[in-house]
Image: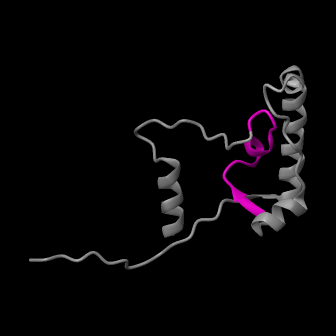
């Protein structure tokens, strides 16, 4: 007997939180200021390049994106973190991707 795999359905998961370009740029530009301040001597000596600030208009022009959905807005917008803060889960718990998949199925 031969079995053939088929896609019999699809689903969509959209996180509850979203970030606008303006919010992202405010956070990123704060990160740039901190980085450049903390590395001022290395920047002046030419050891590292200074980071450049961004703008919401640049992001939209370069990517076409006006806002994006995220799992953890607080972590992404924190200039000291700038990524989602997803707590580690035990092996007996569903992973974050499993959780998204189940939500998409529903």
Tell me which corner region of the image, top left, top right, bottom left or bottom right, holds residue 41: top right
Q: Nearer the viewer, residue 39 or 101?
A: 39
Indicate the position of residue 38 as horizontal and vertical percent values: 86, 23
Question: Image quadrant of residue 86?
Answer: top right
Residue sitting farthest toward the left? 1
Check the image and report above or below for 47 versus 85. Answer: above
Q: Position of residue 76 (x, y in %)?
A: 74, 45
Residue extent of the magenta highlight:
66-81
Describe the colour scheme in one phrase. one colour
Residue 66 in view (yes/no): no
Residue 71 point in image, percent of width and height:
66, 52
Looking at the picture, tell me which residue is in the foreground, 102 or 18.
18
Quarter in which the N terminus is drawn: bottom left
Name the residue located 75 percent from the left edge and 49 percent from the top edge. 73
Rendered position, 102 above or below 34: below
Q: Residue at x 18, y 76 (%)?
A: 3
Q: Is residue 100 above or below residue 65?
A: above
Observer able to see residue 94: yes
Q: Position of residue 101 (x, y in %)?
A: 49, 61
* Picture residue at 82% right of the left edge, 60% below the top: 59
Frontmost residue, 30 versus 43: 43
The verdict on residue 76 being magenta is: yes
Horizontal relation, residue 21 to residue 72: left or right:
right
So how many labels did they put on this image? 0
The question of residue 33 being in magenta is answered with: no
């Amino acid at each position: 007997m031969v079995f053939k795999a088929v896609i019999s359905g699809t689903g969509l998961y959209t996180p509850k939180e979203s970030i606008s370009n303006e919010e992202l740029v405010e956070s990123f530009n704060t990160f740039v200021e901190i980085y450049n301040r903390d590395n001022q001597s290395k920047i002046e000596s030419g050891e590292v390049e200074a980071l450049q600030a961004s703008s919401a208009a640049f992001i939209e022009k370069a990517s076409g994106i006006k806002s994006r959905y995220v799992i953890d807005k607080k972590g992404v917008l924190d200039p000291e973190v700038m990524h989602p803060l997803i707590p580690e889960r035990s092996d007996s718990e569903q992973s974050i991707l499993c959780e998204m998949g189940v939500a998409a199925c529903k």
